[in-house]
Image: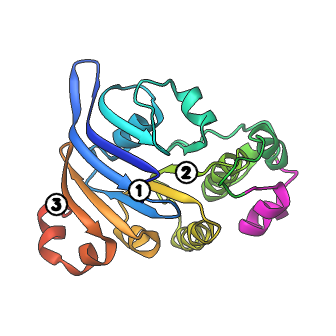
Amino acid sequence: MTPLLQLSGVSAAYLKAEILFGLDLELGDGEVVALVGRNGAGKSTLIKTVMGIQVRRSGSIRYDGREIVRLPAHAIARLGIGYVPEERRVFGDLTILENLEVGRQPQRQGAPAWTAAALFELFPNLAELRHRPAGQTSGGEQQMLAIARTLMGNPRLVLLDEPSEGLAPVIVEQMALAVGKLKREGLSVLLSEQNLRFAGAVADRAYVIESGHIRFAGPMQRLLDDADIRRAHLSV
C-alpha cells in the first residue's frame, strides 16, 4: 500500500544553516507517527519542512502520491494537510466559536468531516467556553482550540508540533485521549514530541531524530522497551 506521506532523502536549512540531512520517513493512512528527540534535534523543523514553512527543502516529499516539495504552504494546506504550530496562535479577540468558524473549509474526500458540535464533544472544555474570547482561556484550552480550529478544515493529515508542551498533566491526558479519538475517526497524525510518555500513549510508530539525522525508526513499543536506544539518543 502506498504511504499517505513519504519523505525520501529530505534535507532542510534555515538560510545557510543545515538542520536536516537526507531523512526518509513514511506515514500510512490512519496512522499516528511520533517524531521524538532532544530539544533542538530537528523535530519541529521536519514538521515545518513537510508544511513548506520557513525552510529551504530538497529531496522528495510525496503526499497521497503527489510530489509537494516545491509547493508553498497554502497549496499544501489545500491538499488536506493541517498544521498546529507549537505557538498555538489562536485569535485572542475572537471567541472560541468564532475561531472555529475561521478554520472552516469544505469536506474532503477520504477525510473525516468535522463540525463545531463534533469538536465540542471531542474537547468538552471548549464547549463550556464557546462564547469566551480565546485570549481569556488557559494554555491548555488554547492548545485544544488550535487543534479544533485545524480540524474544521477537514484535513486528512494533521501535523502537531509539540502538542503537550507546557501543559498540566491532566490536560496532557485529555490531549492523549483526543488524539486517540482522531485516529479512530481515520485521521493520520504526525507529531513532534519531547514527552515520551505522551508519544507512547498515542503513537503507532516512532522516529528518533538527533542532530538532524534519524537514529531509530520502528514501532513505538520497541522504543519504549529499549533502554539502550533511549539512553543513547533521548537522555539529557
How far apart are the alpha carbons under marks 1 and 2? 10 Å
The image quadrant of residue 133 is top right
Q: Position of residue 209 (x, y in %)?
A: 24, 52
Q: Nearer the viewer, residue 55 or 60?
A: 60
Is residue 131 inside the magenta stretch? yes
User: In the image, 35: left or right of 9?
Assistant: right
Q: Nearer the viewer, mark 3 or mark 2?
A: 2
Quick one: SS at disc 1? strand
Marks 1 and 2 close (CB-CB < 8 Å): yes
Quick one: SS at disc 3? helix
Marks 3 and 1 close (CB-CB < 8 Å): no
Q: Which residues are magenta?
A: 113-132
At label 2, the amino acid type is: Leu
User: In the image, 226: left or right of 52?
Assistant: left
How far apart are the alpha carbons under marks 3 and 1? 22 Å
Total label count?
Answer: 3
Question: Mark 1 or 2 closer to N-term?
Answer: 1
Residue marked by disc 1: 27
Residue lying farthest to the right in this orientation: 131
Crowding near pointer 2: few (<14 within 10 Å), some, many (20+)? many
Name the mark on residue 157: 2
Q: Position of residue 103 (x, y in %)?
A: 74, 40
Residue lying farthest to the front in this orientation: 1
**Quadrant assignment for the C terminus:** bottom left
Image point (59%, 35%), residue name: 77
Crowding near pointer 3: few (<14 within 10 Å), some, many (20+)? some
